[in-house]
Image: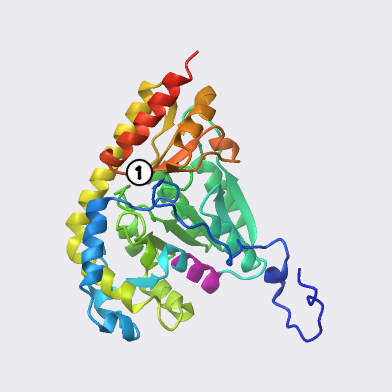
């Protein structure tokens, strides 16, 4: 805390934001990415073929993309056609994170209850605290099949706590878990019955192609948010979108910034919608790479979790230190989790079979060299 924290001339933020335990990473420090490493730690799309398509689109952007304020009507129309809704069902934002924050800003106030899973996308907890909400956290439990969440626990929590907002990524991250369609419908209906807004986070669409977007027509309290940083390979452009009933979309537009995202992002996404086939081909390549990596780890008798996102988990067991040493300085990945439901697992973002091949080779050599 600054030595001037009690200065009478220093304006005080509202209560939840003033809480010193609500802290964010130091924005003055960073970790430049070593180009010699394979970056598989943040679930980005590093598929070279899709990266080349995105780069070509960026190079062909008109001058107005750099020097004018955004005009997004064309993107709204084109995106609506691809998603299968009307433009009035959509809202753009700075990634799916921007949509999530808009939902909190429009619907959650101090003392309201928010339900979200644990562990999950970090910003659900951050936004709950920023807006003074009471959190009902639903912990994933460890099992032989990986993290588990009983759908009935979610329904019961909704009935008992009568929340203002229910947040459920499908698939969830970092667990990679998916709620079965019938169970998800029960959860959506339970939220509606108590007057809660239901946010289904489909950031990993179409790695999991099953979607609840068509449900918007039947459940006006449902919001679906999606990212372009996973399948589309546009994490750096920070553009995502939400899908909702016209009534809810109109409310979300009330709290958006003057411009939802940059002109560059609008132009790029609008043009990339002409390359859906390239995006879908990239998803297939990454799924193939993921399947091959999982198979190779299974052959080494490592326990694996095949999550539904563009990532996977491996438990290296008593070979963990040897594997981590072998990958040190070559591959960036999530080595450890503090959450009990993922204890012992490491997470790798999906990449192509070609990019995964040397990683598999390093792990095989580490295991062979560490054999008793």
Q: Quadrant of residue 112?
A: bottom right
Residue drawn 26% across the image and 63% down it: 83
- Residue situated in front as seen by the camera: 26 or 140: 26
Residue drawn 52% across the image and 42% down it: 152
The magenta-colored residue range is: 99-107
- Residue situated in front as seen by the camera: 225 or 51: 51
Q: Is residue 245 left or right of residue 61?
A: right
Q: Position of residue 109 (x, y in %)?
A: 62, 71
Q: Is residue 191 left or right of residue 2?
A: left
Q: Give the number of callouts.
A: 1
Question: Mark 1: which secondary structure?
Answer: loop
Q: Position of residue 88 (x, y in %)?
A: 32, 75
Look at the image and say whether residue 103 sits in the magenta stretch.
yes
Scheme by which the image is coloured: rainbow
Q: Position of residue 36 (x, y in %)?
A: 39, 48
Q: Above or below — where is 36 with respect to 322?
A: below
Quick one: quadrant of the N terminus? bottom right
Look at the image and say whether residue 185 sits in the magenta stretch.
no
Q: Is residue 80 visible?
A: no
Q: Quadrant of residue 26?
A: bottom right
Main SS of the magenta part reads helix
Q: Is residue 353 visible?
A: yes
Q: Which residue is mark 1?
A: 350
Neighbour tally class for label 1: few under 14, some 14-19, many 20 plus, Cα within 10 Å: many
- Residue situated in front as seen by the camera: 96 or 154: 96
Q: Quadrant of residue 284?
A: top left
- Residue situated in front as seen by the camera: 368 or 145: 368
Q: Is residue 46 left or right of residue 337?
A: left
Q: Position of residue 192 (x, y in %)?
A: 48, 60
Residue drawn 29% across the image and 39% down it: 289
């Amino acid at each position: 805390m600054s030595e001037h924290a009690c200065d009478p001339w220093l304006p005080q933020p509202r209560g939840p934001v003033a809480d010193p335990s609500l802290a964010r990473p130091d924005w003055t420090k960073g970790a430049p990415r070593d180009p010699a490493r394979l970056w598989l730690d943040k679930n980005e799309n590093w598929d070279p073929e899709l990266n080349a398509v995105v780069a070509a689109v960026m190079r062909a952007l008109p001058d107005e993309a750099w020097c004018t304020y955004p005009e997004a009507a064309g993107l709204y129309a084109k995106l609506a056609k691809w998603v299968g809704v009307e433009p009035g069902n959509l809202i753009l934002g700075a990634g799916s994170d921007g949509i999530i924050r808009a939902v909190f800003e429009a619907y959650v106030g101090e003392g309201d209850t928010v339900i979200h899973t644990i562990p999950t996308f970090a910003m659900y907890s951050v936004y709950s605290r920023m807006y003074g909400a009471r959190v009902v956290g639903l912990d994933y439990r460890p099992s032989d099949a990986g993290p588990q969440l009983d759908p009935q626990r979610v329904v019961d929590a909704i009935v008992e706590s009568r929340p203002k907002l229910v947040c459920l990524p499908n698939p969830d991250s970092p667990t990679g878990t998916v709620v079965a369609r019938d169970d998800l419908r029960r959860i959506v209906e339970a939220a509606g019955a108590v007057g809660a807004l239901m946010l289904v986070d489909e950031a990993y669409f179409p790695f999991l192609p099953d979607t609840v977007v068509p449900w918007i027509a039947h459940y006006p309290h449902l919001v679906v948010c999606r990212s372009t940083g996973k399948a589309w390979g546009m994490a750096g452009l920070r553009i995502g979108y939400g899908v909702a009933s016209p009534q809810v979309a109109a409310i979300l537009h009330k709290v958006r910034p003057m411009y939802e995202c940059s002109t560059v992002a609008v132009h790029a996404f609008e043009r990339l919608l002409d390359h859906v086939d390239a995006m879908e081909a990239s998803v297939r390549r990454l799924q193939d790479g993921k399947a091959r990596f999982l198979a190779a780890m299974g052959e080494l008798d490592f326990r694996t979790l095949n999550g539904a996102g563009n990532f996977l988990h491996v438990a290296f067991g008593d070979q963990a230190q040897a594997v981590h040493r072998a990958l040190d300085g070559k591959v960036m990945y999530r080595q450890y989790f503090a959450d009990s439901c993922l204890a012992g697992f490491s997470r790798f973002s999906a990449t192509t079979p070609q990019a995964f091949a040397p990683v598999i080779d390093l792990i095989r050599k580490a295991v062979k060299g560490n054999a008793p």
